Amino acid sequence: MALPVDTDRFARAAQGLLEDGWWVGENALDAQLVERLRSDLETLIVEDRLHRAGIGRERDYHVDRAIRSDRVFWLTRRRPVQHEFLERMEALRLALNRELFLGLFEFEAHYAHYPPGGHYKTHYDSFRGAANRIVSTVAYLTDNWQPGDGGELVIYAENNDEILATVEPRAGTFVLFMSEEIPHEVLPSHTDRTSIAGWFRLNSSIGGQIDPPR
Ligand code: OGA
Ligand code: MN
């Protein structure tokens, strides 16, 4: 979609978020950027720079491979291609605030690598009322994903088990959903599955600390 410039797409994505609580765009990210992100992530994997992802926040934080089995690397502006991705998300943040008056304040994101067998059981990205993560994003990087490779993202209705969408994690596909409202799951992947998961947050200043430790 060329995220930062295609204002029609921005408006439609914002409308989807407003009406359904989620939005999926195929080929939504510039193919060259996706390619460079994937190659950056592959370098980090080879250098063994990823670490086991945890669940919960602060004191409740723990690693549980039965719930999620991805490895992550938090994006920084020090690596040029990560900087570029974060700049696009900044443009998206401004657009969402403009369209939806969400007051999104900042963005955090990590690369995620699910090895074969990797999954993430049904969960919410934010606890209601915690007012930290407001909008979740996922940008898929998996090269040449094929039906049967698994690792689909399943989006569920909030009040029952109805499946609202099953998203194939193809490179270039980009997903937005409301963090507190949308239960979702990553089905077991049969191949190496790579993505960037991100969250737009409110400024949840606690005791003068802008961003309490995870
Ligand atoms: C997450 C998550 C979904 C995906 O990291 O919290 O739900 O499709 N990721 O990778
Ligand atoms: Mn999630």
Image: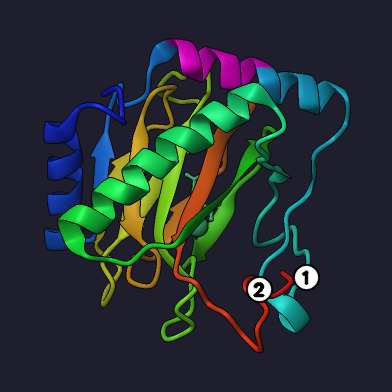
Instruction: Judge whether residue 34 is colored magenta.
Output: yes
Which corner quadrant holds the N terminus? top left
The image's colouring method is: rainbow
Tell me if mark 2 has few (under 14), some (14-19) or many (20+) residues whose alpha carbon lies within 10 angstroms of its own.
Answer: few
Query: How far is disc 2 from disc 1 in space, using C-alphas?
Result: 7 Å
Q: Which residue is drawn at 48% across and 17% down?
A: 33
Horizontal and vertical percent for residue 112?
64, 40
Tell me if mark 1 has few (under 14), some (14-19) or many (20+) residues whose alpha carbon lies within 10 angstroms of its own.
Answer: few
SS at mark 1? loop
Tell me the kind of residue under disc 1: His
**Pick the front one: 6 or 16:** 6
Horizontal and vertical percent for residue 119?
60, 48
User: Which residues, given as a range, are shown in magenta?
Assistant: 32-39
- The answer to which of marks 2 and 1 sits earlier in the sequence is 2
Q: Is residue 179 left or right of residue 18?
A: right
Instruction: Judge whether residue 91 is colored magenta.
Output: no
Q: Circle 1 is placed at which residue position?
A: 62
Residue 12: numbered disc: none
Tell me the kind of residue under disc 2: Gly
Residue 150 visible in this rendered orientation of the protein: no
From this view, report whether residue 142 is shown above or below residue 99.
above
Q: Circle 2 is placed at which residue position?
A: 56
Q: Residue at x 20, y 54 (%)?
A: 98
Q: In this view, does 158 lie to the left or right of 63?
A: left
Q: Residue at x 30, y 68 (%)?
A: 161
Residue 200 visible in this rendered orientation of the protein: yes
